[in-house]
Amino acid sequence: MELRDWNDLLRDEDGMGTVEIILIIVVLVGLVIIFRTQITGIVNSLFKKITNRTDDF
C-alpha cells in the first residue's frame, strides 16, 4: 500500500457508527455487571409492590 492509501484508510469514517454502538453496548453491559445486585434489588422490590397491589383487587 502506498502512503496515500493509508491516509485514505485512516480518514475513512464509514465504520465509526458501528464502533460507537459496540462501545456503548460494552459500557452498558459493564454497568449492569457492576450494579447487578442493586438492579436486582430494585426489580424485586417493584415486583413485590405490583404483586401486593394486584392482590388487593
Image (cartoon, rainbow, N blue to C red):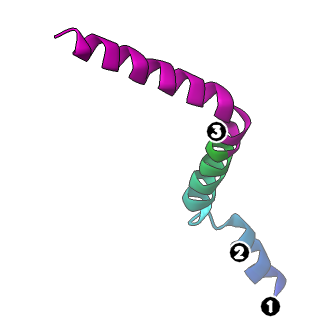
Secondary-structure class at tag 2:
helix
The residue furthest front is 55
Q: Nearer the viewer, residue 16 or 42?
A: 42
From the viewer's side, name the closer residue of 57 and 12: 57
Indicate which disc, 2 or 1, sits on the residue closer to the N terminus.
1
Q: Is residue 4 magenta?
A: no
Residue at the spot x=62%, y=42% of the render?
28
Question: Residue most toward the top?
Answer: 56
Q: Earlier in the sequence, mark 2 or mark 3?
A: 2
Report how far apart the C-alphas of labels 2 and 1 lie in the structure: 10 Å
Instruction: Provide the residue designation for mark 3.
Output: 32
Which region shows up in magenta? 30-57
Residue at the image point whose x is 64% and y is 46% from the top:
29
Q: Badge 1 is on which residue?
A: 1
Left or right of residue 17: residue 51: left
Q: Are marks 2 and 3 in contact (CB under 8 Å)?
A: no
User: Dot 3, crowdedness within 10 Å: few (<14), some or many (≥20)?
Assistant: some
Q: Say left or right for 17 vs 4.
A: left
Quadrant assignment, res 11: bottom right
Where does label 2 land, which residue? 9
- Residue lying farthest to the right in this orientation: 3
Q: Nearer the viewer, residue 37 or 51?
A: 51
